[in-house]
Image (tube, rainbow, N blue to C red):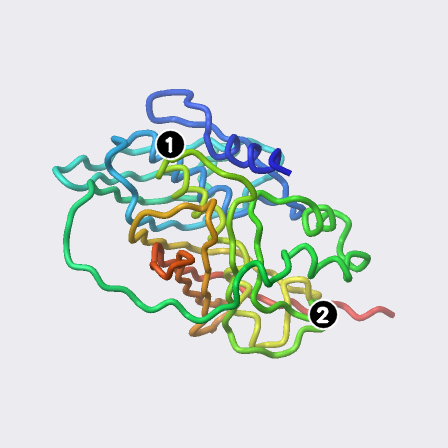
Amino acid sequence: MLAVLDELITLLALERIEENLFRGNSQDLGWGTVFGGQVLGQALSAAVQTVPTERLVHSLHAYFLRPGDAKKPIVYEVDRIRDGASFTTRRVVAIQSGQPIFNLAASFQREEKGFEHQASMPDAPAPESLLPEQEHFRPHAHRLPEALRKRALGPRPFDMRPVDFEADPFQPERRKPARKIWMKTIGKLPDDPALHAYLLAYASDQAFITTALRPHGVHWLSPGMQVASLDHVMWFHGPLRVDDWLLYSIESPAAHGSRGLVQGSVFTRDGRLVASVAQEGLIRQRDVPRAP
């Protein structure tokens, strides 16, 4: 089980090939294209490696430009835009086959004292009372595409426990555009704040934009659905550990023009708000030809 977590940490660590150039391998999770969380986590990892360790990421803004090929490595080029007295800014471009597929701007800050307030954590059952996501997919395994079956049922680096799950993802009911998920890595991690930040970036793209499908009675597995991340924004509010339970509370306030907007809040088990997330994504349902 822990092997999949080690593989993810290695995947996000990257190889430095020049002062501001890094290379990362790709991972196929069953879609043939690179998972958005992978390129997000790798890009943040590249930026982190050019920033003093005492400066922690507090925000990132990213755009997904082209689908990534899961069979090819990705090169990350870091532009050291600014090194100020309190803040450091980096721009990262992910390149594959000579074309940019993703860009990210990230800002880092040295620790400072200041005013503090936060939103309240929503009510949710304890994670121990919930089933891992794999168990919800298991009754429908025979209906999953073969390429996705192994991913859906096999070991994962993150233990994801949805508070509610579609009884039948192939015949979804209309629901409120909201969901809650408990998540943590399947093993303990070193005390490295940067590692926990880019692992959270990786996990934050899971089950995110699909929340915008809920009020429309469709699922990402529904025929003709095209679902893809367009952009991704994160703000980090304080210390966090992804090897302790985190509650990911997600809502979709709007959808229009084949695009959905989702917003997420990440809380520690004791109620601290440690990150806020937002994303706009493509949610397009194409016509499916009827069988003759």
Instruction: Residue lying at the far left in this picture: please name it.
Output: 85
How crowded pointer 1 is (Cα within 10 Å; few <14, some 14-19, many 20+) is rated as: many
Residue at the spot of label 2: 168
Quadrant containing the N terminus is top right
Left or right, 275 with respect to 280, comes to left
Sequence-wise first label, 2 or 1:
1
Q: Position of residue 287 (x, y in %)?
A: 68, 69
- Does 121 appear above or below 113? below
Q: Position of residue 52 (x, y in %)?
A: 25, 30
Considering depth in this image, is 260 or 150 the residue closer to the camera? Answer: 150
Residue pictured at 46% horizontal, 60% vertical? 248
Identify residue type, mark 2.
Answer: Asp
Reply above or below: 124 against 270.
below
- Residue at x 22%, y 39% (from the top left corner): 88
Residue at image position (71%, 65%) is: 223
Left or right side of 161 for 250: left
Residue at 33%, 48% in the rendered image = 60
- Distance from disc 2 to disc 1, alpha carbons, whole Å, reads 43 Å
Residue of label 1: 77
Viewer-side residue, 65 vs 85: 85
Q: Residue furthest top?
A: 18
Percent position of residue 90, x then y: 28, 38
